[in-house]
Image (cartoon, coloured by chain):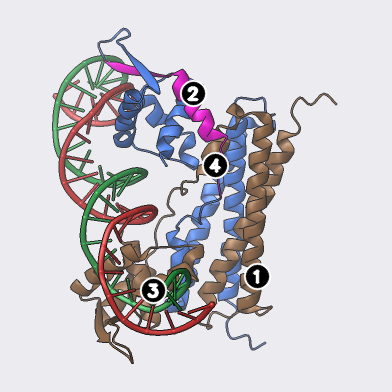
Chain colours: A brown, B blue, C red, D green
DNA sequence: TTCGGCATGTAACTCGTTACATGATTTT
DNA sequence: AAAATCATGTAACGAGTTACATGCCGAA
């Protein structure tokens, strides 16, 4: 599938940068829905160079550090757009360990079970707060239009927030159901 | 992490079965949140046998087919429960290709962009309907109590339904925003 | 007799993570 | 002087997918 390839091309399509810059972008902005380590990024950039989808120039700036600044080529851009605009069937649900554990939750000790659900709840509430702060810091109350450079950024952040809200709702429901065993009232 | 190991132990903890049975269970029931091919399952069962977590007996039934019926051992059960009741930090968001593409949606042709969102919408609506049918067929209107064998099954199905509903809501919102560019009214 | 389901396995490959490895520059 | 950050790479391993490979049984 080479998804990383297209993630890199997409970033380089926005602006030229080094492997290190890309690594940082993955850690900060895109981390919410895609991630990659430098150990994966550097070899992939090499591969893209071999394929003629990107080129690099070595920059020394004021220092003597050897930076490789990568730029996307026309061929790379064409490849990227082709991938971007391809309609694909939705994949099977991504694997989530906690959901697997939930499937087996009849085998858990009942006290422990509620503890685990509550632990998840707290963590997802924290994550939701973090995402909301992100949204406020990046967009305030302004909803970007499709013309804005960060429109995609906004949509993806919205997706993440809605996902967390739903997960929290689900976890609360799980805890509620766990406490309603033996309905003898 | 060895998650597959614990998925297999969890299934064998419910009842003894063959690798083929496990493969089928993955395809049907658990598929909604975890999946594995037989090419992964058979070697893992061998490994579990070596580790003393499962044992097997060869069954010929009425036919001459050699089936290996696997049974979990006490050691395997202890290992499974230890994994099941361990509290773990929530992982980073799983990678989703469509969200990556959404991030880059400013680079799409505007007509094509809406087409892609609508295609996703239709597919997720179909999936939601499928999940709801599943729920009705398996549970009807009855909400299982935590004592029920299929309580975990119910919770996981509920999670999947809520996730799809949220995704649909998000996609509709994306389409709405895409059609509100250049707000000159 | 051919096809689909039952039943088990291996091989090659891709993707991703963790760790190893180096070295300069900047901040404390 | 030490620690953090910039900057680039490789190696080993684990997990997962696709394809290869075999053989029985029952139904059409």
Instruction: Read off the residue under disc 3.
Output: A22
Q: Look at the image and say whether residue A68 sits in the magenta stretch.
A: no
* Residue B125 position (above or below residue B55): below
Q: What element carries label 2?
A: helix
Instruction: Read off the residue under disc 1.
Output: A133
Identify the magenta region: B66-89
Outermost residue toward the right in this view:
A185
Quarter where residue A78 is shown = bottom left
Q: Is mark 3 on a helix, strand or loop?
A: helix
* Residue D28 position (above or below residue A115): above
Instruction: Give the position of the C terminus of chain B as an image quadrant.
Output: bottom right
Q: Residue at x 54, y 42 (%)?
A: A99
What is the C-alpha distance between the residues marked 2 and 1?
A: 43 Å
Instruction: Give the position of the N terminus of chain B as an image quadrant.
Output: top left
* Residue B159 position (above or below residue B144): below
Between label 2 and label 1, give the one nearer the viewer. 2
Q: Which of D3 and A13 is in front in this view?
A: D3
Q: Please tell me if label 2 and label 3 are on a single chain.
A: no
- Residue B77, numbered circle: 2
Say few, some or many: other residues with alpha carbon within 10 Å of mark 4 (under 14 / 14 to 19 / 20 or more). Answer: many
Q: Please tell me if label 2 and label 1 are on a single chain.
A: no
Q: Is residue A85 something that shows in the picture? A: no
Q: Is mark 1 on a helix, strand or loop?
A: helix
Between label 4 and label 1, give the one nearer the viewer. 1
Instruction: Read off the residue under disc 4.
Output: A99
Q: Residue at x 64, y 89 (%)?
A: B184
Residue C26 in picture, x, y percent from top left: 44, 84
């Amino acid at each position: 599938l080479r998804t990383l390839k297209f993630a890199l091309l997409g970033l380089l399509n926005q602006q030229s940068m080094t492997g290190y810059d890309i690594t940082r972008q993955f850690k900060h902005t895109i981390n919410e829905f895609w991630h990659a380590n430098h150990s994966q990024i550097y070899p992939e950039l090499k591969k893209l160079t071999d394929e003629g989808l990107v080129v690099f120039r070595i920059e020394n700036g004021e220092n003597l550090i050897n930076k490789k600044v990568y730029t996307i080529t026309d061929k790379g851009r064409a490849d990227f757009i082709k991938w971007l605009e391809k309609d694909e069937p939705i994949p099977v649900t991504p694997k989530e360990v906690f959901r697997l554990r939930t499937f087996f939750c009849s085998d858990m000790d009942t006290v422990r079970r509620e503890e685990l659900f509550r632990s998840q709840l707290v963590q997802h509430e924290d994550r939701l707060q973090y995402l909301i702060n992100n949204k406020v810091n990046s967009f305030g109350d302004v909803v970007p239009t499709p013309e804005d450079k960060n429109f995609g950024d906004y949509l993806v952040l919205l997706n993440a927030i809605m996902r967390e809200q739903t997960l929290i709702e689900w976890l609360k429901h799980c805890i509620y159901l766990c406490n309603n065993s033996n309905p003898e009232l």
